[in-house]
Image (cartoon, grey):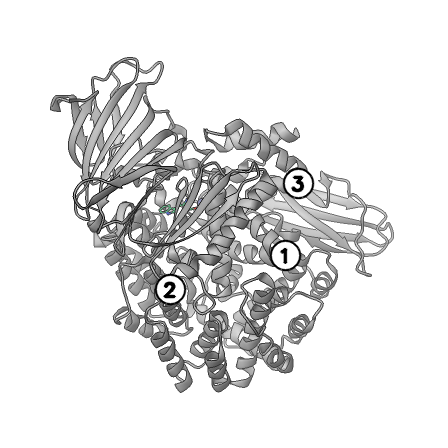
């Protein structure tokens, strides 16, 4: 396939000023008429043709200024429409008529039907499946949209912008017209048609304008959209207060659909959401679901400024909107909830998804330099590492200059299709800080390694910290330049106080070392006693740290660090070390040593009522099996890791049984509230329940907890523990059956039922997954259900998926090949579960390789899947 390169950017030959679209909706044959006003860009040759993108379109008619264009004057290929002989100067009108078939569109890109609702998904290149157009983000036009439909086929007709008017059309049909005054790229176009329920509210902006807020869901589900509405209003307020950003239309609408390739989409004034991120009530949604809804509603809303008002020049700049908007939604959630607990969750997620991506065959820079299929670049690197890069800019500049830089960005680039260079220039201009070296974070892939050593000179009362950076080669980048790495630090004295003096040897201010050379030593003088170094506090830089730190020093940080995240980091590092050595011993069938010291810290944390419950829950949650695998790095035996983690949990559970048993019963009683405080208490109770049930062998108690649960958080936890720990117990069978019967009409709850079973550890879970795939509840056409079962099994069940006989890999390969024919994006994403296959031990590696080869040899692959396979196979 074609390779697109960052350096090849060239503006279009023609400028689209306006576009008027008319849709006549029909499931099998929707007619689309597009009238565009264009002009030739200054300096473009008079014979240059207009070349528009298209994909699976039937062209019905083509006119220039109202006259049919002679067939000799244009050419159609499967992916383009070329029109020659256009006016040299002045505006002209092109009318393109096409027919499309929403009901047979299974890709979920362009215009499709989801449970009888017409909806669109145009990012990144879906608009070309609706009409011929310059389907690229730097072509900004003003849209007017008229939608016509049979009233019994689509009662409700929505598009971007403000409502212009509507009414009866001809027999049995009606229409609605929408106008969006803000010039936008085609990827932000949206249309929805269907019969949906709605809740409404309003928001008064900081300048006193009233905005109507509407959320559309399936009839009967309206009450479940209330939390999303609340989150939306809080997001609108927050963006005004924190960034001075006001909403800019009379109406903001959200539509929830059940078939969606990602989480949600920020179309101008008309967001379309995966219903998983809108619908919630205590009976069917967990606390994590509520937190995700809050974060994604905020994320899509924040895109109105970072993405829509200022968009991307090309798809290489995707992180310009995504990394920045993730950063904004992270800080929003931190403000709405507990900041340290939110940060811990972010670090966990980054390490679980982005670090492995950056260490494997799919590694790419935050701003990629080339791509074959842009859909494959909506990655943890672009989103999560992209957010970390913005966070580092704030760390380097400080809060005040960061805000000045953002203000300048909004002022200077409103209405633009911008680049990362534009973005960085705003921070340089606002602060005077040179960010040239820092910009390497956008162009160099891989996770830097910082090796840290310290030296204490008792006689001279000096303490020095030596930092050395390195960055391993990644695909296409064998040599790397030195990065600017901001490392927040603290020196903690024996009595727990912090040493305040400033070091020599390099730039360091506000508690941050700026590592800019290969190796730098920062020297502190006048240090009264040997301090303990707390480094990369709050995970100020997304790097790996190699430091020989004694368990006693980690315990000192865990006890005294002024930063909660650093305290968690220290305990987590201690746990990781114990787990790695246990996994190595387990691999060699050797006896595991006691982890009494770790158990003591964990139990003390569990019982420490001065700490917030959510923090205690995070601390008690040991590094996952994938975390341990990542830290080990190579020659991975997932069974040994699982056995080691189980053994460590068991020892901790037995040592702290009393504490855990008491905490397991400590979930708040009374009416359910999804707020952070109650959610934190439930998280602690749920984590304690896991330990207590390990120690006590508790199927009956878990079944009682399952039966008694009045909210999904505790119910799902009890069910998960039954399935994970007592797979063949009668209680487990009963609980699974009762869950399925109770939620038979609730697809999102049934997704959880599938996921819990898909993630049950052990080789046997493979058989269970095969059984579920063949079961009556399984629907391969629904992406949420596929992700709930196949996605959860392959990305979230290390022992089941990595079964030594390779059956898990073959299952994934088979499903990827099958789903690729309907929905290439989904297939490619599921396949990335194999991204770390080269870190497995040799037997599994060979099975994984053969599975990848079998996909490659299946033939007729989409560009999405073949791009991933080709990058994964050397
Ligand atoms: N900007 C949105 C990306 C998205 C998407 C991309 C490819 C295919 C389908 C998609 N649905 C949504 C989501 C976001 O980051 O806000
Ligand atoms: Zn986004």
Q: Which sits in the foreground, 665 or 697? A: 665
Q: Are marks 1 and 2 in contact (CB under 8 Å)?
A: no
Residue at 66% across / 52% down in the picture? Answer: 537
Residue assigned mark 3: 399
Q: Earlier in the sequence, mark 3 or mark 2?
A: 3
Point out the quarter of the image occupied by ligand 2.
top left
Q: Earlier in the sequence, mark 3 or mark 1?
A: 1
Residue assigned mark 2: 748
Q: Are marks 3 and 2 in contact (CB under 8 Å)?
A: no
Distance from disc 3 to disc 2, alpha carbons, whole Å, reads 40 Å
Q: Which sits in the foreground, 386 or 156? A: 156
Residue assigned mark 1: 340
| Left or right side of 779 for 386 | right
As helix, strand or loop, the secondary structure at mark 2 comes to helix
Q: Is residue 363 visible?
A: no
Residue 208 location in percent, x, y?
55, 38
Image-quadrant location for residue 728: bottom left
As helix, strand or loop, the secondary structure at mark 1 comes to helix
> Which circle marks residue 384 in the picture?
none
């Amino acid at each position: 396939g074609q390779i697109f390169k960052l350096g090849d950017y060239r503006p279009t030959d023609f400028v689209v000023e306006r576009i008027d679209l008319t849709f006549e909706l029909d499931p099998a044959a929707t007619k689309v008429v597009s009238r565009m006003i264009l002009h030739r860009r200054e300096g473009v040759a008079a014979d240059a043709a207009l070349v528009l993108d298209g994909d699976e379109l039937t062209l019905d008619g083509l006119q220039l200024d109202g006259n049919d264009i002679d067939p000799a004057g244009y050419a159609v290929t499967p992916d383009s429409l070329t029109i020659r002989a256009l006016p040299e100067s002045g505006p002209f009108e092109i009318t393109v008529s096409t027919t499309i078939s929403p009901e047979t569109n299974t890709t979920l890109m362009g215009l499709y039907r989801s449970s009888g609702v017409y909806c669109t998904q145009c990012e990144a290149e879906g608009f070309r499946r609706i009409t011929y157009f310059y389907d690229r983000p730097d072509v900004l036009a003003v849209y007017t949209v008229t939608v016509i439909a049979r009233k019994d086929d689509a009662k409700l007709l929505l598009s971007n912008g403000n409502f212009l008017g509507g009414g009866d059309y001809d027999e049995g049909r009606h229409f609605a017209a929408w106008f969006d005054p803000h010039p936008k790229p085609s990827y932000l176009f949206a249309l929805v048609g269907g019969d949906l329920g709605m809740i409404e509210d309003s928001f008064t902006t900081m300048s006193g304008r009233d905005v109507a807020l509407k959320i559309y869901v399936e009839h009967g589900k309206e009450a479940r959209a209330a939390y999303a509405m609340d989150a939306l209003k809080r997001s609108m307020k927050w963006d005004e207060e924190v960034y001075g950003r006001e909403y800019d239309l009379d109406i903001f609408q959200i539509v929830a659909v059940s078939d969606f390739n990602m989480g949600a989409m920020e179309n101008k004034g008309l967001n379309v959401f995966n219903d998983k991120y809108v619908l919630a009530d205590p009976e069917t949604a967990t606390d994590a679901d509520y937190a995700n809804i809050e974060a994604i509603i905020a994320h899509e809303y924040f895109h109105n400024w970072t993405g829509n008002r200022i968009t991307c020049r090309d798809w290489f700049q995707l992180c310009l909107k995504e990394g920045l908007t993730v950063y904004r939604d992270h800080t929003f959630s931190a403000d709405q909830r507990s900041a340290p607990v939110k940060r811990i969750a972010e670090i966990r997620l980054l390490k679980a998804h982005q670090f492995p991506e950056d260490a494997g065959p799919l590694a790419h820079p935050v701003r990629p330099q080339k791509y074959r299929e842009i859909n494959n670049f909506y990655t943890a690197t672009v989103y999560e590492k992209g957010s970390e890069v913005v966070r580092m800019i704030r760390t380097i500049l400080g809060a005040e200059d960061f805000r000045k830089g953002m203000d300048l960005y909004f002022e200077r680039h409103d209405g633009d299709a911008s680049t990362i260079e534009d973005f960085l220039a705003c921070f340089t201009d606002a602060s005077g800080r040179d960010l040239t070296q820092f910009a390497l974070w956008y162009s160099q892939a891989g996770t830097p390694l910082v090796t840290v050593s310290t030296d204490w000179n008792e006689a001279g009362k000096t303490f020095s910290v030596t930092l050395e950076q390195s960055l391993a080669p990644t695909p296409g980048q064998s040599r790397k330049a030195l990065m600017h790495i901001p490392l927040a630090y603290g020196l903690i004295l024996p009595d727990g106080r912090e040493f305040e003096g400033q070091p020599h040897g390099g730039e360091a201010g506000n508690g941050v070392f700026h590592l800019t050379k290969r190796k730098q030593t920062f020297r502190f003088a006048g240090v009264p006693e040997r301090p303990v170094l707390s480094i990369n506090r709050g995970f100020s830089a997304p790097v790996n740290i190699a430091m020989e730190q004694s368990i006693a020093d980690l315990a000192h940080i865990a006890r005294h660090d002024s930063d909660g995240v650093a305290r968690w980091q220290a305990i987590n590092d201690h746990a990781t070390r114990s787990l790695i050595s246990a996994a190595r011993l387990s691999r060699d069938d050797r006896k595991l040593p006691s982890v009494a010291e770790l158990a003591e810290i964990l139990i003390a944390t569990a019982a420490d009522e001065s700490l917030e419950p959510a923090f205690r829950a995070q601390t008690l949650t040991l590094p996952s099996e994938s975390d341990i695998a990542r830290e080990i790095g190579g020659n991975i035996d997932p069974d040994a890791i699982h056995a080691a983690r189980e053994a460590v949990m068991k020892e901790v559970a037995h040592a702290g049984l009393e504490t855990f048993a008491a905490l397991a019963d400590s979930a708040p009683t009374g009416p359910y509230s999804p707020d952070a405080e109650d959610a934190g208490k439930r998280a602690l109770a749920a984590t304690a329940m896991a330990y207590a049930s390990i120690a006590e062998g508790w199927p009956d108690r878990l079944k009682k907890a399952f039966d008694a649960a009045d909210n999904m958080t505790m119910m799902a936890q009890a069910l998960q523990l039954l399935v994970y720990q007592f797979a063949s117990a009668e209680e487990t069978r009963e609980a699974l059956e009762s869950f399925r019967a109770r939620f038979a009409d609730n697809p999102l709850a049934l997704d959880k039922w599938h996921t819990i079973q898909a993630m049950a550890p052990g080789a046997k879970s493979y058989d269970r997954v095969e059984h579920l795939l063949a079961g009556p509840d399984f629907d391969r056409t629904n992406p949420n259900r596929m992700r709930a079962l196949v996605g959860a099994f392959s990305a979230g069940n290390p022992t089941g998926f990595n079964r030594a006989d390779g059956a898990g890999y073959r299952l994934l390969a088979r499903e990827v090949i099958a789903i690729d024919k309907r929905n290439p994006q989904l297939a490619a994403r599921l396949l990335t579960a194999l991204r770390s296959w080269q870190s497995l031990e040799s037997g599994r590696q060979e099975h994984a390789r053969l599975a990848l080869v079998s996909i490659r040899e299946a033939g007729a692959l989409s560009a999405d899947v073949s791009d991933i396979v080709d990058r994964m196979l050397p």
